[in-house]
Image (tube, helix red, strand yellow):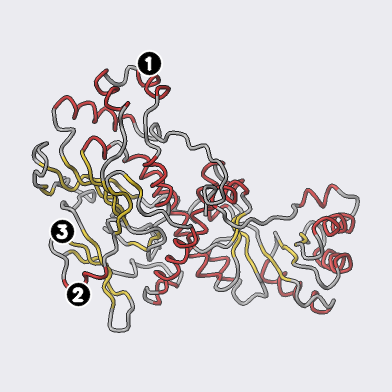
Amino acid sequence: MNTADLGLPVAVPSTALFTDQYELTMLQAALRSGTADRRSVFEVFTRRLPEGRRYGVVGGTGRVLDAVENFHFDETILGFLRERGILDGPTLEWLADYRFRGDIWGYPEGEVYFPGSPVMRIEGTFAEAVVLETVILSILNHDSAVAAAASRMSVAAGDRPLMEMGARRTHELAAVAASRAAYVGGFHTTSDLAAGFRYGIPTVGTSAHAFTLLHDTERDAFTAQVDTLGSGTTLLVDTFDVTEAVRAAVEVAGPELGAVRIDSGDLLLIAHRVRQQLDELGATKTRIVVTSDLDEYAIASLAAAPVDAYGVGTQLVTGSGHPTCSMVYKLVARADSEEPGAPLRPVAKKSMGAKTSIGGRKWAARRPDADGVAEAEVIGTGPVPADLADRQLLVPLVSAGKVVAREPLDAARDRHIAARAALPLSATQLSRGEPVLPTEYV
């Protein structure tokens, strides 16, 4: 869900300047050389997963569709480019009429991917497709990194809810995108109201240490919060002495106290002590929420603790040590002329080193074993084998410039849970290793 679904107005600025200058200088040179209208195929992929990752998660597809739809050059933007002297008159005139009119295929949001997976394929003229490179990579690299971290944390948390709380640890706009990606990866709620407004993600939040320190006593703070939010609220109990705070919390709110939050110290030890104390005080249904700079490993270490929910901030919005997926946007096929219907031929960089790529317009499928568990990511440029015809991973996202694949955010979230469940069991373990599926080229 987004604000459009809620019937709320949304100001959507142009995304045209979310780009690198060389995209437009390439466009200008191609227009001059007569090659700008050659039909071209670009693909987004990564050559390797971040160290320690066993699978990647596609995040940001919905945001890419919005960005492509709003990629246009109004007079203010054209005036900026004109004043900078970056482009000549004919190029500015071409940009004034720009709209992407090609086709985009891709892995649907929430799907998993592996090295070489053609996560997104952009087809159109060279001119209309090349200018989208930067904004597409910016979105996919950020959102997929956060979604992958969220997925690992979701695996570690099991059935316990996860709250995204990282808005104060990143750029204010990145925080909204991170909340969205975290939800796709398995988180349940966010503290960021902008994300709740924009994407309909459930929001949560009660109080911080400052609220306790504002009052003369901890009991006064608890009383004020319960009087305002009700006994089902969550009280922060580690400002001073945890044991005394828990006692006061139950005395103020009664055994119906919703939850207590622990934000510091030895969380494993404290959680056990707090659970015992709550039970002894009759607050057997009061939940324990832990925060304090958690990552997937810290969450996993608390699996045996009486913890009911986790709040995660810094490690989530920074990709848990891997803030990008190193996705690239490469030309893999193009026509030899601007004539309509001119055949495509594969092209690829062939320099020495690790940055080589494979030419040709690709398809991708995931082959299962006899038990239905995925065993390989299969990528090809020729005919699709009959046994993989109904297992194609790329779906149409944009057709002749029109977005055809908008969906509720919950659909991407559900898709990810299903895709992850179809991977080998080793995918759900946090141990470092090679990608859980090999990539096979046919």
Residue placed most toward the observer, 19 or 383: 383
The picture quadrant where one finds residue 9 is top right
Q: Residues within 10 Å of mark 1 (few under 14, many from 20)?
A: few
Q: CA distance from mark 2 to mark 1?
A: 57 Å
Q: Which residue is mark 2?
A: 387
Q: Amino acid at mark 3?
A: Thr
Q: Amino acid at mark 2?
A: Asp
Outermost residue on the bottom side: it is 370
Residue drawn where x is 64% and y is 67% of the image: 309
Q: CA distance from mark 3 to mark 1?
A: 44 Å
Q: Amino acid at mark 1?
A: Glu
Q: Position of residue 191 (x, y in %)?
A: 63, 53
The dot on residue 381 is: 3
**Mark nearer the N terminus (2 vs 1):** 1
Q: Secondary structure at mark 3?
A: loop
**Mark nearer the N terminus (3 vs 1):** 1
Is residue 217 left or right of 345 when viewed as pictured? right
The dot on residue 83 is: 1
Is the C-beta separation of discs 3 and 1 under 8 Å?
Answer: no
**Mark nearer the N terminus (2 vs 3):** 3
